[in-house]
């Protein structure tokens, strides 16, 4: 396996707004989008996308890392054989490209490559891009040559265009190829979440805006599978972007769908590491069985763990090319100033309050993401801060799809002055431009989750800040970040918020508070890596609740206590 290594980057005059979804682009998925700047042929999906990284998947990841929540789903199937270790880098060809400027951009222009004139027109006139990113420059020549490629690239560095651009060229070159269906699918893109699938589909339609004969569609959850299969069958669908579960459903149940897939010339697995983290191994192996063996395959991933090497052995040719635009020492954004604070339990809420107040004071166009450990805690924290006078939005799995879509779009498009409390549904893949601060309150599920959350700021070459707030007994988590440049912050001045909290908690639906308390217990009683017993967790939970202004913790039904393994402890 050949390695094309890009250890650094090259400076450029103009940066791309990487991965951004315009309001017009998202509107192309709704009714009446004919005037959208993004061509919406073949789409009649409800407006906008669902938020990335569904929390059910995050729960699976917590269990995998031995930091699971109480309502975690069953662990993913592991039908693949144990992966072979990756070849050492020293045994692979290395082509360093580094001028020391630490940019995600290259010196190459799109028009320097053999790309169709109509596609170039869309890139220049619709997207407004002039130059390529490093991952685009590194992978485009290889993919155009028909090579299978495993690419390591961060989210937010232009990788969607990196695989879509040559895919369109492959489709144009295969117009006269043999088909097994009157409406053949030439390219299949598999994404881990509905949000990522929708983003990729919008990008595909944008690139194909001037190719009147081409179309892209999605196969995702959240809508009628029957109507979706009908549209895929009857409307232009040279590119199909889908999630594993819905794709497998169509393969097994939609008449003619398997025949459409027999014409696939190129397969793309986007965010391959997340696909596997979310438990899609079995689905992927079943989907691979339905595809032609003679095809080109591309895997794009932010990290290359053993699981990704395992699936690459099934999907890629043995002589595939490995392109690394990340390197060994740049997992997190170099532009993000990372700090952590270890605070007493009774001060946690007040410390977050002070951090937000101080950031707002120095950053007029503040745009903040606050990550909480569970959906219910997110809901309660958002309600509290809303009552305390902050401009707050919340997004988590307890909200409806329509609500999540609306709030996600609002936060994405706002120019500042907004704070969004979120669970891990926003941890990966989502492009929220100009986020000025990411706060993580409570121990993350895993090191990877910390990194993915942090990646919501410092994007497209811009600066960002990240703060991790831990309790003293969560401090051992920092050992997982020992190779990351993160310093201890000076604890901000803490105000006495007890009176304020008591004045607002009576205005909040107490069922939200009860669920938050129960969720907190569920999260930490199963956090085995923290090495704390259940008696201690219960003691800490009461301190947590007191820090929010309550004189006593809410009552929990006995059946729930029993299910949580706290019988005799919490009674």
Image (tube, rainbow, N blue to C red):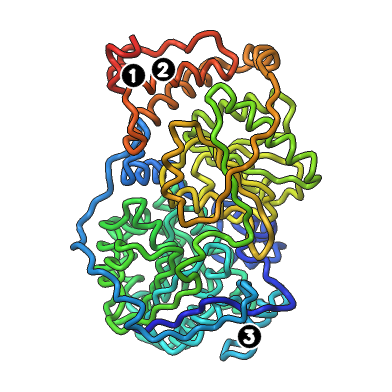
Q: Nearer the viewer, residue 320 or 502?
A: 502
Q: Which residue is mark 2?
A: 539
Within 10 angstroms of label 3, few (less than 14), some, or many (20 or more) residues? Answer: some
Rendered residue at 33%/65% (across/down):
308
Q: Secondary structure at mark 3?
A: strand
Rendered residue at 26%/69% (across/down):
85
Q: Is 405 placed above or below 104 here? A: above
Rendered residue at 50%/9% (across/down):
552
Residue 372 placed where, x, y %?
A: 52, 36
Task: Give the quadrant of residue 23.
Answer: bottom right
Mark 1 vs mark 3, CA separation in Å:
60 Å
Q: Nearer the viewer, residue 53 or 24?
A: 53
Left or right of 282, for residue 407: right
Q: Which residue is mark 3?
A: 108
Mark 2 vs mark 3, CA separation in Å:
59 Å
Q: Which residue is mark 1?
A: 535
């Amino acid at each position: 396996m050949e390695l094309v290594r890009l250890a650094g980057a090259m400076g450029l005059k103009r940066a791309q707004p990487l991965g951004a979804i315009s309001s017009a682009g998202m509107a192309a998925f709704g009714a009446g989008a004919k005037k959208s700047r993004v061509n919406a042929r073949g789409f009649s999906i409800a407006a906008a996308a669902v938020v990335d990284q569904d929390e059910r998947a995050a729960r699976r990841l917590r269990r995998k890392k031995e930091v699971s929540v109480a309502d975690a789903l069953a662990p993913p199937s592991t039908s693949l054989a144990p992966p072979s270790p990756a070849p050492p880098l020293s045994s692979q060809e290395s082509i360093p490209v580094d001028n020391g400027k630490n940019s995600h951009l290259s010196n190459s222009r799109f028009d320097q490559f053999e790309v169709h004139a109509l596609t170039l027109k869309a890139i220049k006139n619709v997207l407004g891009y002039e130059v390529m990113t490093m991952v685009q420059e590194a992978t485009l020549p290889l993919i155009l040559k028909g090579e299978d490629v495993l690419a390591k690239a961060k989210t937010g560095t232009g990788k969607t265009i990196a695989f879509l651009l040559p895919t369109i060229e492959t489709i144009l070159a295969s117009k006269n190829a043999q088909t097994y269906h009157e409406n053949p699918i030439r390219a299949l893109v598999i994404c881990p979440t509905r949000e990522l699938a929708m983003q990729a589909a919008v990008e595909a339609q944008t690139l194909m805006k001037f190719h009147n004969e081409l179309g892209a569609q999605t196969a995702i959850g959240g809508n009628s599978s029957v109507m979706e299969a009908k549209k895929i069958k009857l409307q232009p669908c040279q590119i199909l972007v889908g999630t594993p579960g819905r794709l497998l459903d169509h393969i097994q149940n939609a008449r003619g769908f398997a025949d459409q897939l027999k014409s696939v010339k190129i397969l793309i697995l986007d965010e391959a590491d997340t696909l596997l983290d979310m438990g899609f191994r079995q689905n992927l192996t079943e989907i691979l069985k339905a595809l032609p063996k003679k095809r080109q395959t591309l895997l794009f991933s932010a990290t290359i763990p053993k699981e990704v090497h395992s699936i690459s052995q099934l999907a890629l040719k043995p002589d595939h090319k490995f392109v690394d635009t990340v390197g060994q020492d740049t997992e997190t954004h170099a532009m993000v100033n990372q700090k952590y604070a270890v605070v007493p339990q009774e001060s946690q809420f007040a410390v977050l309050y002070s951090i937000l107040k101080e950031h707002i004071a120095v950053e007029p166009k503040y745009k903040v993401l606050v990550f909480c450990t569970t959906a219910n805690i997110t809901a309660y924290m958002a309600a509290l801060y809303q009552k305390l006078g902050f401009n707050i939005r919340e997004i988590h799995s307890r909200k409806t799809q329509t609500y999540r879509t609306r709030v996600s779009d609002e936060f994405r498009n706002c120019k500042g002055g907004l704070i969004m409390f979120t669970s891990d549904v926003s941890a990966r893949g989502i492009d929220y431009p100009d986020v000025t601060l990411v706060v993580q309150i409570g121990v993350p599920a895993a090191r990877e989750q910390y990194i993915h959350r942090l990646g919501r700021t410092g994007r497209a070459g811009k600066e960002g800040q990240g703060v991790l707030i831990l309790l003293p007994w969560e401090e051992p988590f920092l050992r997982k970040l020992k190779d990351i440049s993160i310093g201890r912050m000076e604890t901000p001045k803490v105000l006495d918020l007890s009176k304020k909290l008591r004045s607002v908690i009576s205005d909040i639906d107490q069922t939200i508070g009860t669920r938050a308390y129960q969720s907190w217990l569920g999260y930490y009683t199963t956090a085995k890596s923290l090495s704390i017993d259940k008696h201690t967790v219960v003691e800490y939970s009461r301190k947590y609740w007191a820090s929010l202004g309550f004189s006593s913790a809410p009552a929990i039904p006995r059946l729930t206590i029993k299910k949580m393994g706290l019988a005799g402890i919490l009674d």
